[in-house]
């Protein structure tokens, strides 16, 4: 999957919120040391054709950018989980799902 946008700056959170007013935005919070998180990532990649082009897709490496995850929780009023998908539209979180519930078809329903 070539469409991941690395989320590696706190300033990007504001950009994501603003961009969600024009196009759905997805944040995938991934722990590179967690088997469940890796499995969720693989499911997203295998079913990416269901969501491709419908949203900008941000990838957050939690081990390297925990501060950004904390900021996401604060700014978007979501509880930190890993792995986690957060979907924003019109400046608001419209869906958040974690662990084994992360499925491309479930994500697609909110885009």
Image (tube, rainbow, N blue to C red):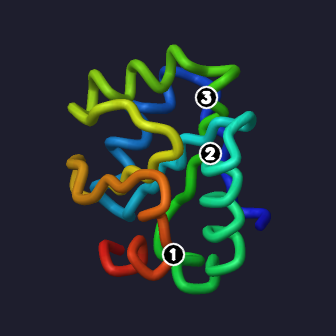
Q: Residue at x 51, y 14 (%)?
A: 67
Q: Residue at x 62, y 68 (%)?
A: 44
Q: Residue at x 28, y 22 (%)?
A: 74
Total residue callouts: 3
Which of the 4 quarters of the picture holds residue 49?
bottom right
Counting from the top left corner in percent of width and height, residue 61 is at: 66, 33
Q: Earlier in the sequence, mark 3 or mark 1?
A: 3
Q: Measured along the vertical axis of the image, is residue 81 above or below residue 23?
A: above
Marks 3/2 in contact by CB < 8 Å: the verdict is: no
Q: Which mark is residue 104?
A: 1
Marks 3/1 in contact by CB < 8 Å: the verdict is: no
Counting from the top left corner in percent of width and height, residue 46 is at: 70, 77
Which element type, helix, strand or loop, lies under badge 1?
helix
- Residue picked out by circle 3: 62
Which of the 4 quarters of the picture holds residue 76?
top left
- Decide which of 43, 60 is in the foreground and name it: 43
Counting from the top left corner in percent of width and height, residue 101 is at: 42, 64
Residue 31 left/right relative to 85 = right
Q: Which residue, as the protein is rendered here, is positioned at the far top? A: 67
Structural crowding at the residue carrying mark 1, measured as other residues with C-alpha within 10 Å and reported as few (<14), some (14–19) or many (≥20)? some
Residue 10 left/right relative to 36 = left
Residue 107 left/right relative to 50 = left
| Cα–Cα gap, marks 3 and 2 | 9 Å
- Residue picked out by circle 2: 59
Q: Which residue, as the protein is rendered here, is positioned at the far right? A: 2
Q: Measured along the vertical axis of the image, is residue 106 above or below residue 27?
A: below
| Cα–Cα gap, marks 3 and 1 | 21 Å
Residue 68 left/right relative to 19 = right
Which element type, helix, strand or loop, lies under badge 3?
loop
Which of the 4 quarters of the picture holds residue 71?
top left
């Amino acid at each position: 999957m070539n469409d991941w946008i690395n989320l590696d700056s706190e300033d990007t959170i504001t950009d994501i919120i603003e961009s969600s007013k024009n196009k759905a935005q997805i944040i995938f919070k991934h722990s590179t040391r967690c088997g469940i998180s890796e499995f969720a990532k693989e499911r997203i990649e295998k079913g990416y054709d269901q969501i491709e082009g419908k949203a900008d897709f941000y990838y957050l490496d939690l081990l390297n950018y925990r501060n950004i995850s904390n900021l996401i929780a604060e700014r978007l009023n979501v509880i930190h989980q890993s792995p986690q998908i957060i979907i924003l539209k019109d400046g608001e979180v419209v869906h958040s799902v974690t662990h084994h519930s992360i499925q491309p078809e479930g994500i697609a329903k909110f885009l």
